[in-house]
């Protein structure tokens, strides 16, 4: 079980960085697609789902590219839906490339926390393999300090 300071660290780094102008941009992109839903009463998770749905279903490459720049701002909560896009066999290659780019543009801590949450879930082995592969890449590409932080950011189950 993480210490209280570790819990606060996780809470701090798993938060989103989405701003009101980002939300407005997403709404304007949705209007252009005639995909406006009642978002005034949407909570964070519903709005993230709306943004991911628009990202996947739009036929406009411009809209998709703009959304790919906004999705990392949803923080660790965006990791699972973006991984699902990478994992899904029938996703177009441009969609997968933008999903990968979104993951790469996340802050390191948000990405690590999101990957840990995916590994804590009972998910398909293929999705789990993608998450493990990404964590291994993070470990290889970063200094040794990341090995000291991972046990603080991940559950014991995931770390093992």
Image (cartoon, helix red, strand yellow):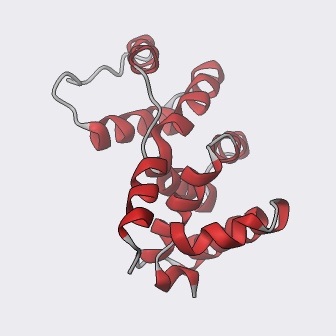
Task: From the top left corner, tell me how far across and down residue 21 is, in percent.
Answer: 44, 14
Relative to 14, say whether 145 is above or below: below
Residue 19 appears in view: yes
In this picture, residue 48 sits left or right of residue 55: left
Residue at 52% across / 60% down in the picture? 113
Task: From the top left corner, tell me how far across and down residue 48 is, in percent.
Answer: 38, 39
- The part of the image, by quadrant, that contains residue 2 is bottom left
Task: From the top left corner, tell me how far across and down residue 35 is, in percent.
Answer: 35, 22
The mark tally for this picture is 0
Residue 63 versus residue 24: which sits nearer the camera?
24
Quarter placement of the C terminus:
bottom right
- The part of the image, by quadrant, that contains residue 137 is bottom right
Residue 89 appears in view: no
Residue at 60% across / 22% down in the picture? 66
- The extreme left residue here reads 41
- The part of the image, by quadrant, that contains residue 59 is top right
Relative to 75, say whether 119 is above or below: below
Relative to 134, say whether 123 is above or below: below
Quarter placement of the N terminus:
bottom left
Residue 14 versus residue 33: which sits nearer the camera?
14
- The extreme bottom residue here reads 160
Residue at 70% across / 72% down in the picture? 147
In this picture, residue 37 sits left or right of residue 131: left
Task: From the top left corner, tell me how far across and down residue 82 is, in percent.
Answer: 55, 50
Residue 2 versus residue 54: which sits nearer the camera?
2
Residue at 28% across / 40% down in the picture? 46
């Amino acid at each position: 079980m993480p210490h209280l300071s570790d819990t606060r660290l996780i809470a701090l780094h798993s938060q989103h960085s989405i701003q009101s102008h980002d939300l407005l941009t997403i709404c304007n992109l949705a209007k252009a697609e005639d995909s406006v839903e009642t978002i005034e009463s949407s909570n964070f998770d519903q709005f993230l789902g709306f943004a991911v749905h628009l990202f996947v279903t739009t036929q406009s490459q411009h809209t998709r590219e703009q959304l790919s720049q906004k999705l990392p701002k949803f923080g660790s909560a965006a990791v699972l839906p973006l991984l699902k896009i990478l994992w899904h066999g029938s996703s177009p290659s441009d969609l997968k490339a933008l999903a990968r780019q979104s993951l790469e543009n996340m802050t390191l801590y948000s990405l690590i926390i999101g990957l840990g949450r995916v590994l804590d879930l009972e998910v398909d082995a293929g999705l789990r393999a993608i998450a493990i592969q990404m964590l291994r890449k993070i470990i290889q590409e970063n200094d040794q300090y990341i090995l000291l932080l991972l046990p603080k950011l991940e559950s014991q189950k995931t770390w093992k």
